[in-house]
Image (cartoon, helix red, strand yellow):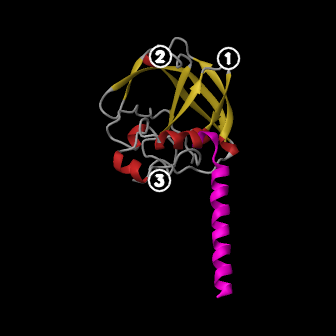
Amino acid sequence: MKFLIALLIAVFFVSCVQNEKQILDETPFQKKMNAEFKDASRSPLKEKDLKVFKGLDFFSFDSTFVVKATLKRTPDSEWFNMKTTKDGVSKERIYGVLSFELKGQSYQLNVYQGEELMQTEGYKDYLFLPFLDSTNGLSTYAGGRYMDLRIPDGDTIKLDFNSAYNPYCAYNEKYSCPIVPRVNNLNLEVKAGVKAFKK
């Protein structure tokens, strides 16, 4: 009997330590995302999903997915209609091309600027980086993921793929989300950021 009690205490202790470690390992980005999703006034989740929501599923933070990119601005790029998931459009332009190395390979991604956001207070320097990778449809959302960036003072910008997140339409079909342009495809598995949402 004493052995059984000791065993139960040990299991409880290990469980507590693991839960504590999980909380301590949570990055500021993950904390912010989870707080937003738990807040009924801001959450994109459906009511039924919000009731049982405990937290998003993230890849463990991986510093190899934090890279420095060179930004080549394209000041003469034309505005175009980026298609969205609900047959709408988002007025965007290619702000520049990001060149960087990831896992020993060289890549380029277009980074976009939205016409509407340019005129919105607090978002004048906002850049939008949608991308596809080899995890889509497997461990991550099939339609690709997004990253938020700000216009840098110089010609380099930090890309932290640990902050890659799903569009709202991955959680609720009522949202209309920009469709990731095929040109922004990374031919590797980006095991960083938010994973696919299990409904």
On the image, numbered disc 3 is attached to which residue? 138
Provide residue 95's location: percent of width, then percent of height: 54, 19
Front position among marks 2 and 3: 2
Tell whether 57 sits left or right of 47: right
Q: CA distance from mark 3 to mark 1?
A: 37 Å
Q: Where is mark 1, residue-wise?
A: 153
Which SS class for mark 3? loop
Residue type, label 1: Asp
The answer to whether the residue labelled 2 contacts the one labelled 3, judged by CB atoms less than 8 Å apart, is no
Residue found at the far left of this picture: 87
Could you give the CA–CA distance between mark 1 and mark 2, rounded to whole angstroms?
20 Å
126 left or right of 65?
left
List x then y, in percent, for residue 146.
50, 35
Circles 1 and 2: CB atoms closer than 8 Å: no
Note whether 83 is above or below 33 in the view shown: above
Instruction: Please state if 81 lies on the left or on the right of 127 as rendered.
Output: left
Q: Is residue 131 magenta?
A: no
Q: Give whichever of discs 3 and 1 has the lower sequence position.
A: 3
Which residue is drawn at the image coordinates 42% and 40% (left, top)?
40
Q: Amino acid at mark 3?
A: Leu
45 lies above or below 8: above
The residue tagged 2 is 120
Going by the image, does 112 lie left or right of 152? left
Magenta-drawn stretch contains 23: yes
The boundaries of the magenta stretch are 1-30
